[in-house]
Amino acid sequence: MELPPGVNSNLSKGEVCRLKKSLYGLKQSPRAWFGRFSATMKEFGYKQSNSDHTLFIKHNEGRVTALIVYVDDMVMTGDDPREMKALQIYLATKFEMKDLGHLKYFLGIEVARSRQGISLSQQKYVIDLLTETGMLSCKPVETPMEMNHKLGIFPDQDPTDKDRYQRLVGRLIYLSHTRLDIAYAVSVVSQFMHTPSKEHMEAVYRILRYLKSSPGKGLLFTKNSISNIEGYTDSDWAGDQTTRKSTSGYFTFVEGNLVTWKSKKQKVVARSSAEAEF
């Protein structure tokens, strides 16, 4: 341990400094650690992404290597095995590291490889969620939300447990990272986080019942000969019962693989269905 500047270091032989607080207990420790990690990556020629500061990318002779970090867990990928091995050796000289091999499970997302491609799912996450909520033996439904639903905020609605509602919706929001089929339903129920009612809670339980029918559904990224980018978008009109705002949705494919999707309420009120879609 090095003494900080300004501290009298007249210690006699045999005396030591007592550390009152560990690094993990300090509020500034995450920033200090990530600052050192970022500097280390940049020294090795990696560039930090502007959209996601935890992502580092390096281009070398037409090949790409990427590393993303969450707290102290790192995932490395790319099409340059030699560069990935060199980065691993370099980081091992700077930090204490342990190689866990091929990625199988990370932050609740399961990764499986086959000849068809790479599959991402959250099956264990779904089963744990159904178990904690007591819905593991419920009767499944075919759709995550009723068609032409009338959910909104009304003065005569029956309130429900606000904390429980927020916890359930928060877990469903994280689940939508690999389940685009519940993106719209989750975006609807997340609009009532501050004033949930029993009707809103029933909509959340319907999403759980839908998940019971297909807990292992996820994304499949395949290697194919398609070399284009496709995007699809649509909108309803005045779907929100309270503000009469419309909801837009879109998803995009890169080389035949689904990469982005979103369902979001529009900022202004559209006067026609054509304006809402425009």
Image: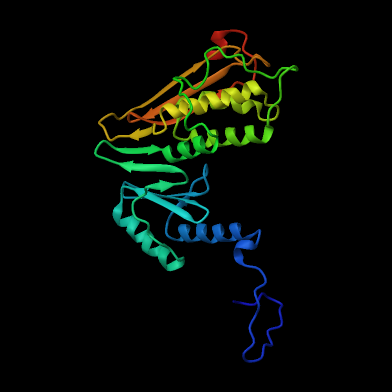
Q: How many labels sit on residues?
A: 0
Is 240 or 80 nearer to us in this picture? 240
The quadrant in which residue 192 appears is top right
State the residue at coordinates (63%, 92%).
13
Percent x, y for residue 262? 50, 27
Percent x, y for residue 176? 49, 32
39 left or right of 163? left
State the residue at coordinates (48%, 52%).
69
Is 88 or 41 nearer to us in this picture? 88
255 left or right of 249? left
**Residue 260, placed above or below residue 247:** below
State the residue at coordinates (59%, 61%).
32
**Residue 195, placed above or below residue 146:** below
Percent x, y for residue 190? 61, 28
Percent x, y for residue 36? 53, 61
Give the quadrant of the N terminus. Answer: bottom right
27 left or right of 141? right
Q: Residue furthest bottom?
A: 13
Q: Is residue 188 visible?
A: no
